[in-house]
Image (tube, rainbow, N blue to C red):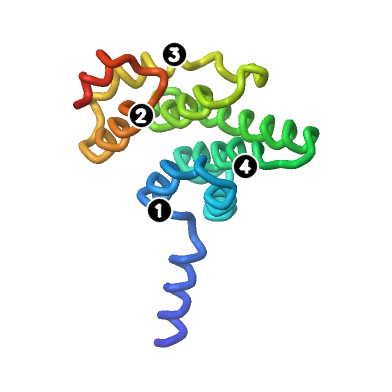
Amino acid sequence: MKLLLTFILWFNFAGNPDLASIRKMYTDVSKSETNAKEFVDKLAGVSGNDDKILVAYKAASILLDSKFEKKLGEKMERFKEGAKLLESTVKTEPNNIEIRMIRLSIQENVPGITGYKKNIKEDKKFITEHYDEQSNSLKEYLKNFILQSKSFSEKERQLVK
């Protein structure tokens, strides 16, 4: 019996992180290198075959972590790795509003020199058009993002208040 309980506990902790904890971490991940590293570690076990929202957060973790790389070449490689993974999740699930929000949050904050800002208007439009169709918990999460986002106007922010 103890062995079974140990196995169940190990399996629960060794599995993928829960979405609620990832969402909570994501709001503070860009504030420090420590937060970014913890976020990367939390998502390390996520693979391309897992829930695409988790894969998108993993891509975001790689992108955010890339800014803390010391060598320019490593920074660029890490950035490209994260962007490629994020784009593949959007391509797999183009109608997933949370994945669109993740991409928008990354693109509005990366330097223009990266060239990774081309989907801001498209994602913003998608989010505003499909916001009302979401569950209450996801609406609340999206609302918090919209209220602090640089991409949404004051008029658009009023629609989610």
Q: What residue type is labelled 4?
A: Asp
Above or below, 9 relative to 76: below
Question: In screen coordinates, is 108 left or right of 1?
Answer: right
Q: Mark 2 points at which residue?
A: 148
Q: Name the residue under label 4.
A: 65
Determine the secondary structure under disc 3: helix
Q: Mark 3 points at which residue?
A: 122
Q: Quadrant of residue 81?
A: top right
Does any portion of residue 138 appear in the rendered image? yes
Measure how far apart labels 1 and 4 are at the Cα level.
20 Å
Above or below, 46 relative to 132: below
Closer to us: mark 3 or mark 2?
2
4 and 2 marks in contact (CB < 8 Å): no
Does any portion of residue 46 appear in the rendered image? no
Question: In screen coordinates, is 129 left or right of 3?
Answer: left
Give the mark nearer the N terminus: 1 vs 4.
1
Determine the secondary structure under disc 4: helix
Question: In screen coordinates, is 82 left or right of 103?
Answer: right
User: For mark 1, does the 10 Å Cα neighbourhood hold few (<14), some (14 to 19), or many (20 or more) residues?
Assistant: few
Q: What residue type is labelled 3?
A: Glu
Query: Which label number is shown at residue 18?
Result: 1
